[in-house]
Image (tube, rainbow, N blue to C red):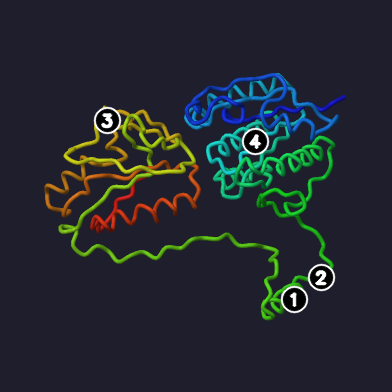
Amino acid sequence: MKKRVVHYINNFFAGVGGEDMAHIPPEKREGVVGPGMALQPALGDEAEIVSTLVCGDNYMGEKTDEALDQLIAWIKEEKPDLVIAGPAFNAGRYGYACGSLVKKVQEELGIPAFTAMYDENPGVDTFRKDAYILKVADSAAGMRSAIPLMAKFAKKILNGEEILGPDEEGYFERGIRVNYFHEKRGSERAVEMLLQVMAGKDPVTEYPLPKIDRVDPVPPVKDMAHTKVALVTSGGIVPTDNPDHIESSSASKYGVYSIEGMEQMSKDLFTSIHGGYDRQYVLENPNLVVPLDAMRELEKEGVIGELADYYIATTGTGTSTDNAKRFGEDFVNKLKEDSVGAVILTST
């Protein structure tokens, strides 16, 4: 009897438009759709993709609980032996959706589930400890190599085979330590590694340390009364039409918006598209995240020299550190050109 598999993909891979259709709610389709058309033959006669679940990335980011509840209900009805999500490649919102689903499937239904992403996808850092995430390329151009990897891993799970370490299976490390007996003592292995380093080689460590980007703090501002200040936020406050189409989570862009001549952030002109917090109060008063009203008071009182006539915004939730770093390196040039001497960075 064939094992039952449920496959999850986003609206793009389901052929339901691009960014303009990222708002679509969950839907269930019988059989294979999109990447499933390649995944099914790779699974062979051992398993059958009985249904494909689809959801827009924006919908999942903005209404995560609602979307997951519906998807979980459909999965429960199908009674699958395995759930596969993606591959998401380097699509941040898609990675967030895939990670959210496989985590919930395992926690609530106890059904094995996994996904696949590129190493810079923010979904990797968010969900790597919760589920298996296979390593794939950064774009759909890598689909041809991703499908065999996913099918092979799926077969091992379905057949109840032992899942080996990340290097052997091709998934991201999950922070799980396994005790085993090595043929050499730790001291001997350490000396061997030291000798390799001294010989100019690059030995593979048994315990890789995380890479932390350290930023040295700048000296404090000496004279705020004569300093131009700018507002920057990761709280997702944008003009109501979101002209730059900044994502509600896993942002890939930022925006620069005028506040010239404004005394406060009006709810008629600005809104929050952030998908990671309860926005009900901010929708009524955007100044809670971008404190324009308070800054105007400080400007009038002479506490600060002046306020820049624009603010810079993005969404912080799920956004990769690489993207965040890129944003900062990009817009800092504008701040320097405009003689900004201090920045107030607000979050949520």
Crowding near pointer 1: few (<14 within 10 Å), some, many (20+)?
few
Going from N to C along the chain, the mark reached first, 3 or 2, is 2
- Per the image, the residue denoted by label 2 is 184
Mark 1 and mark 2 in contact? Answer it, CB < 8 Å: yes
Going from N to C along the chain, the mark reached first, 4 or 1, is 4
Write down the quadrant of residue 71 in the picture: top right
- Marks 4 and 1, how far apart at CA: 41 Å
Q: Looking at the image, which is closer to me, 76 or 90?
A: 90
Mark 4 and mark 2 in contact? Answer it, CB < 8 Å: no
Image quarter (top left, top right, bottom left or bottom right) of the C terminus: top left
| Picture disc at residue 192 | 1
Position in image of residue 234 (x %, y %): 38, 44
Going from N to C along the chain, the mark reached first, 1 or 2, is 2
Of the residues tagged 3 and 2, which is closer to the observer?
3
Position in image of residue 133 (x %, y %): 67, 44
318 displayed left or right of 142: left
- Marks 1 and 2, how far apart at CA: 11 Å
Write down the quadrant of residue 151 in the picture: top right
Crowding near pointer 3: few (<14 within 10 Å), some, many (20+)?
few
- Per the image, the residue denoted by label 3 is 269
- Marks 3 and 4, how far apart at CA: 37 Å
34 displayed left or right of 330: right
